[in-house]
Amino acid sequence: MGSTRKKLLGFAAAFAVFALADAWVFLTVRGAFIRIAEGMRSSQAALFVRSAPRDADLVPGWLESSRDAVPGERFVFLSADPSSGAFEPRGAGAEIASFWASHREDPEVVKGLDSAYYFEAYTTARSYDLGGISTTVSFEPLLNADGSDIIGILMITREAGAWGEFDRVLAVFAFGVLALFSVIYLVGAFARDRVSAFAVIILALIAFIFIAYPLFETFRLTFTSAGKPSLDTWKRVLGGDYLRAFGGSVLLGALTATFSTLVGFLFAFTVNRTSMGGKRLVNALATLPVISPPFSLTLSVILLAGNNGLITRQLLGLSSFSIYGLDGLVIVQTIGMFPIAYMTMSGVLKAIDSTQEDAALDLSAGRFTAFATVTLPLAMPGILSAWLLVFTNSLADFANPLLLAGDFRVLSVEAYMEVTGRNDLGGGAALSVMLLLPTLTAFLAQRYWVSKKSFVTVTGKPSSRLTELASPAVRRVLTLLVVLILAFIVSLYATIVAGCFVKNWGIDYGFTLSNVWEALSRGRKAITDTVTLAALATPVAGILSMVGALILVRKTFLGKRVLEATLMTPFAIPGTLLGISYVLAFNKAPLVLVGTAAIIVINYVIRELPVGLEGGVANLRQVDPSIEEAACDLGADSATVFRTIVLPILRPSFISSMSYTFVRSMTAVSAIIFLISARWYHLTVQIYNFSENLRFGLASVLSTALIAIVFAAFGIMNLLVRDDGAMEKNVVA
């Protein structure tokens, strides 16, 4: 107790000293800035005064023609009345006339006039209410040509306390430094595990600044109308048509998530738990849909199976077939999103220790029984995570429904049209917010179910043995299904590649190379910017997600559930909502990021952070904490435990997280379309613009280039972060 009291007294003393130093720095910087700024303003005003004509009759016209010469200041010409000698405003509006009538006898105004009369400038020591704005008044003498007499006085009004924005930014910085000092001191004095404590604090700051704060700004917008509190937006969006679109989104998301998870599990199990051949090729082809723009597959499907599709109309002669609507959307989204489920479940299935399956087989259980009672339950965290990921991605997707929905209404398209078509940010934000309800419900249900069960399978060095549960006949069936799905995917992408060399798809199928040269020349900046920004975001997201997973699974601290829910919230945020939120939050002090590369990189990291967290959490639930506890008992600190024990075990999820972040950064559309600028452009936006203008050949070239870049990045990533084979399984006959 005495030790704690001494620490608190020490903190109080240190805090007081640091707070005084912080306040001194704040006041010094503020005073210096204001002096410099006021000096620049005065010099600017003095130069403006010197340019005035020397004829009193010309001054009012000169002021009218140079009304905005000095931003933030208004100039009024005061000339002496011939009969009374008193100074009166000439050519001033009613507001200035009223002000002059009320304050002409004010001591400060009288002093200013007297000073200007004797050739000295003067600024009032007090401020006045001018049109509801606190205003200071300066008086500058206007001299004749030889400087021997005054021809009048310029009264200059400017807003008092015009440095309020700077004061707010500086105050935020000063309080932030003080808070940072307090946190560092308290953690150093009281925390047993300082590394973990700092990690929790950093994660909490990230969650607050880049997730909670932008969402708060968006929620606030939905409850305002014309700058005033109002429920008009919600009254409108909760109408029948929008509720029907909400139901359509949930139905589409559930169907897509279910089919994508089934296909993803088929691929993950066949690749990681059987002895099928060509696994590298299967893995490469299976990731194709996730490393291309989300609307590429839709365009391919329309061109092949649309109303005038190559297959449906020209080859099969079908006239009543339509790919538009729910069925077409489920097919396209399933093909486009099953790689998310596949990548999520691959790390989990690879990490399952085969000794438990061996034990089931030794106890006379059949292959299917061992699979159903051991493998499938242990893989359930990955399966549920994959379903949730696909469900939220389907809800947030607007590019595919925009092109393929037909009469089937979904909320993401309605929200997008509110923003881009009707220029209603509040309505679009409200519709996007509605999508949070089903996603958060699914997330909480998944978390509740997983928390009730144990999925630990790794209690020491993982076994390298893999007991194949699939019989030869079953393996052949699984392989055939995988091959058929891959053949369908390849046919879709073959259409994109063919489009690179076709003059005008659907009209003129003649061969040409002009698309290649034109697309690469027009898209050079977009390619460079996109690769640069994605490369910056990838390692940050990978490391942050693994540290976050370790903290959330292994550590107990106050507010853990709130922090976890906040970090997972980007699951549910549609891209349009996230883009709107970032524009609203970071287009003003203290963080002005709109138009910079930073806001795009931060968007990438925050948007894809839940994917890495989900994969890391699912992987860590299979690892017995006693391994890390043993290392701590031997003297290793948290950083050493993470680097030498946790990270090698998490390597599959770590690589998957970085890979997923990179490809999603390269193929992002919905949020990025609000955040790009003239300085930083994006490849997918360029592709979308080409597609929207029916320049399918140019869009195909850039889509193919994007796929090639991502595959090259995968190769480099595997070389830099080489898998040590800790989780590899060798098939035992």
Image: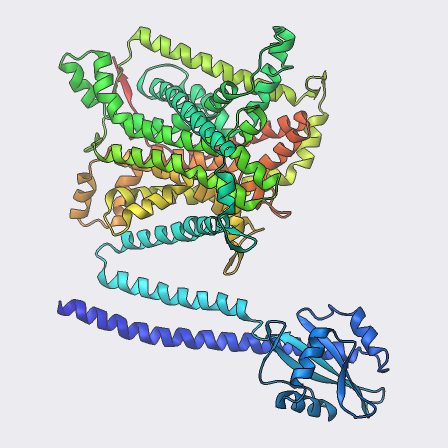
Answer left or right for 167 relative to 175: right
Q: Quadrant of the C terminus?
A: top left
How many discs mark residues in the rendered view? 0
Answer left or right for 144 relative to 506: right
> Residue 417 falls in which quadrant of the image?
top right
Task: Give the x, y percent position of residue 449.
Answer: 25, 32
Q: Does residue 439 sit above or below 158 in this rendering?
A: above
Q: Residue at x 81, y 92 (%)?
A: 149
Answer left or right for 82 relative to 320: right
Of 449 and 344, nearer the camera is 449
Q: Does residue 442 sit above or below 540 in this rendering?
A: above
Q: Residue at x 41, y 30 (%)?
A: 391
Task: Give the x, y percent position of residue 686.
Answer: 63, 36
Q: Can residue 727 be seen in the rendering of this structure?
A: no
Q: Can residue 142 be seen in the rendering of this structure?
A: yes
Q: Does residue 387 sit above or below 96 in this rendering?
A: above
Of 415 and 343, nearer the camera is 415
Q: Quadrant of the N terminus?
A: bottom left
Task: Give the x, y percent position of residue 321.
Answer: 58, 11
Q: Residue at x 19, y 23 (%)?
A: 355
Colour setting = rainbow
Task: Give the x, y percent position of residue 331.
Answer: 49, 19
Q: Residue at x 39, y 25 (%)?
A: 342
Q: Does residue 418 sit above or below 278 in this rendering?
A: below
